[in-house]
Amino acid sequence: MRTSSRECDPADAWRRCPCALVLPALLALLLSAGNAFSQDNPAPVSPGSGTVERRRIEPGMGAPGFALKDIAGASFTFAAEKTKSPMLFVFFSIFCESCRRSLAHAQRLQDRFGRTGLRVVAVALDGQPFRSSVSGFARQEGYGFRVLMDEIEANDRFRAADLFGVTEIPTSVLIGSGGRILFVGKGVVPEGDIEKFLTPAKKP
């Protein structure tokens, strides 16, 4: 894991040394590094040692399918969810201050556009050892959206993040009700950049 005043890579630490993440000393180090995150710049997510190339995701492409479990242990399968309504995915880490800002933006978007079908789904890259911490963080912040835990597969790749070409966190991906990608943004994305793809709720 490398840290500096502007970047941190908790995902790479989990990818390369998952057993070390359970140590209290490293947890304290990660917390310290997380507090040093830039408020606007995304943190890099380093590729693993697997041989699968990270896919490049762009608007107009079909969103890749995946299945994960949320922080409550319930299953989420994208293939079964993608045609219901637009979905905003936010890939994040609890050790990333910029991610917290991005998740706050996502919550406001769901509050404003939820009645017209928008669903926000956050995907944590912190690894299963931090599942309870991610759950506690989501409760503390009062998020009203679903939070999934990404998983590392046998080829040393994230099950969802690598499919979506995530190289930095936070990364936001807006998907239309037909499963097509409408928008991809890295860092703290202004809410207006996503709003233009959404249908405003009608006043009662």
Image (tube, helix red, strand yellow):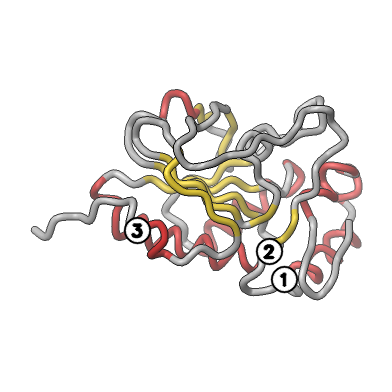
Q: Mark 1 or mark 3: which is in front?
A: 3
The residue at the point 41 percent across, 30 percent down is: 81
Q: Earlier in the sequence, mark 1 or mark 3?
A: 1
Residue 186, quarter of picture: bottom right
Image quarter of residue 159: top right
Q: Which residue is mark 2?
A: 96
CA gap between label 3 and label 2 equals: 24 Å
* Mark in the foreground, 3 or 2: 3
Q: Residue 155 in the image: state x and y as whole percent.
A: 81, 26
Q: Whole-percent x and y of residue 166?
A: 66, 45
Q: Residue at x 14, y 55 (%)?
A: 202
As drawn, 175 above or below 201: above
CA separation in Å, label 1 and label 3: 26 Å
Q: Earlier in the sequence, mark 3 or mark 2?
A: 2
Q: Quadrant of the C terminus?
A: bottom left
Disc 3 crowd, CA 10 A, few/some/many (<14, 14-19, 20+): few
- What residue do we see at 85% from left, 50% from top? 13
Q: Left or right: where does residue 32 sit relative to residue 143? A: right
Give amino acid for label 1: Phe
Q: Quadrant of the N terminus?
A: bottom right
Residue 195's disc number: 3
Left or right position of 84 against 130: left
Name which residue type carries label 3.
Answer: Glu
Kind of residue indicated by mark 2: Cys
> Which residue is found at the position 57% from the left and 27% from the top?
67
| CB within 8 Å, label 1 to label 2 | yes
Disc on res. 37: 1
Q: Is residue 152 left or right of residue 149?
A: right
